[in-house]
């Protein structure tokens, strides 16, 4: 694997376009030139077509290019808990998860390591990785960077967070989020098309768009559903999530310092039905950290 990635000398991998040399300094995401991971494990809390019966081989990357003030994974996304690993070590982790029986390799918040992961995924496939690779991202991505992933990623699992520029600026420090994320998702769909499954009903290729409903309609989920229907069609797979709970710095913002109410969620469910979406997943209303992994402030990579 390459020791020097030219793209990291003047980083423009994501919409931040920090133009910094990641071998010498850190931009908004706080990532260096090395891949940083906190935890890898068989995870059973994803959508049924992802977790299946054997679990999703989930790799949780440290740092993030957004900065959501309510992030449920804030200890690794904002505080940066984790361990820097070489590309070769990352390949071994993927193959280890496959050997444990994982249905897929699930890369969680990987966008700021896109360039390095191209080589990692290629090497893993050359060394025997045969299960699907899932790109589980916040959707704040550059189309140009995503195009480099074509043929390497089998399933895109973006979390489309906002429809409103003002809210995305306040709660995730990215006023351009709605524009950039929608363009990114259209590119994801171009690459992988509609959902396809293997004989066991596990996602093999395609796109699933996650929508986390926030209190007081902060996410603009109804507007987002209308955009998906118009831009991608009602056959698009949507995963509607009701698992928001206030954490990290949410207590500084009264409008999101609570879980969502049943009427708030039902309003979104009604719109989902009204628009004619026929594929996807919904959750029971829950305000709990049950599925949030117990990340550790570590000096060595851990496996659960």
Image: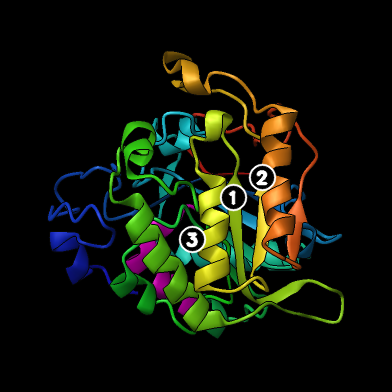
> Of label 2 and label 3, which has the lower sequence position?
3
Region rendered in magenta: 108-123
Disc number lying in front (2 or 3) = 2
* Labels in figure, total: 3
Measured Cα–Cα span from mark 3 to mark 1: 32 Å
Disc number lying in front (3 or 1) = 1
Disc number lying in front (1 or 2) = 2
At label 3, counting other C-alpha atoms closer than 10 Å, the crowd grade (few under 14, some 14-19, many 20 or more) is: few
> Of label 1 and label 2, which has the lower sequence position?
1
Q: Is residue 165 left or right of residue 226?
A: left
Front position in the image: 108 or 237: 237
Front position in the image: 153 or 167: 167
The x and y percentages for residue 242 are 69, 38
> Of label 3 and label 1, which has the lower sequence position?
3
* Quadrant (top left/top right/bottom left/bottom right) for the N terminus: bottom left
Q: Which residue is mark 3?
A: 89
Residue 47 figure quarter: bottom right
The x and y percentages for residue 56 are 71, 59
The x and y percentages for residue 119 are 40, 75
**Residue placed at 64% from the left, 24% from the top?**
259
Q: Are marks 1 and 2 in contact (CB under 8 Å)?
A: yes
Q: Is 150 drawn above or below residue 177 in the view shown?
A: below
Q: Is residue 232 left or right of residue 131?
A: left
Q: Which residue is mark 1?
A: 211
Front position in the image: 10 or 286: 286
* Quadrant (top left/top right/bottom left/bottom right) for the C terminus: top right
At label 2, counting other C-alpha atoms closer than 10 Å, the crowd grade (few under 14, some 14-19, many 20 or more) is: some
**Residue placed at 62% from the left, 81% from the top?**
128
Q: Which residue is mark 2?
A: 268
Residue 21 visible in rendering? yes
Q: Which secondary structure, mark 1?
A: strand
């Amino acid at each position: 694997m390459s020791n020097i990635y030219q793209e990291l000398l003047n980083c423009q991998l994501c919409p931040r376009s920090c133009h910094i040399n990641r071998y010498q300094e850190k931009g908004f995401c706080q990532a260096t030139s090395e891949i940083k991971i906190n935890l890898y494990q068989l995870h059973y809390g994803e959508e049924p077509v992802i977790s299946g019966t054997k679990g999703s081989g989930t790799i949780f990357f440290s740092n993030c290019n957004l900065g959501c003030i309510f992030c449920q994974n804030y200890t690794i996304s904002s505080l940066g808990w984790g361990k820097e690993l070489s590309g070769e070590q990352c390949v071994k982790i993927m193959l280890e998860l496959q050997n444990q029986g994982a249905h897929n390799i699930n890369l969680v918040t990987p966008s700021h390591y896109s360039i390095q992961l191209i080589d990692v995924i290629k090497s893993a496939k050359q060394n025997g990785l045969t299960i699907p690779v899932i790109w589980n991202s916040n959707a704040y991505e550059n189309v140009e960077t995503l195009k480099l992933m074509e043929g390497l990623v089998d399933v895109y699992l973006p979390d489309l967070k906002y429809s409103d520029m003002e809210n995305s600026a306040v709660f995730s420090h990215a006023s351009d989020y709605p524009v950039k994320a929608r363009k990114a998702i259209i590119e994801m769909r171009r690459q992988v098309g509609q959902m396809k499954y293997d004989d066991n009903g596990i996602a093999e290729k395609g796109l699933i768009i996650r929508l986390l409903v926030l209190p007081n309609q902060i996410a603009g989920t109804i507007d987002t559903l209308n955009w998906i229907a118009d831009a991608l069609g009602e056959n698009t797979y949507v995963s509607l999530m009701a698992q928001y709970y206030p954490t990290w710095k949410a207590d500084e913002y009264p409008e999101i310092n609570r879980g969502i109410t049943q009427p708030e969620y039902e309003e979104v469910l009604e719109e989902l039905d009204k628009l004619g979406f026929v594929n996807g997943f919904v959750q029971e209303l829950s305000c709990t950290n049950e599925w949030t992994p117990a990340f550790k402030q570590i000096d060595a990579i851990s496996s659960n």
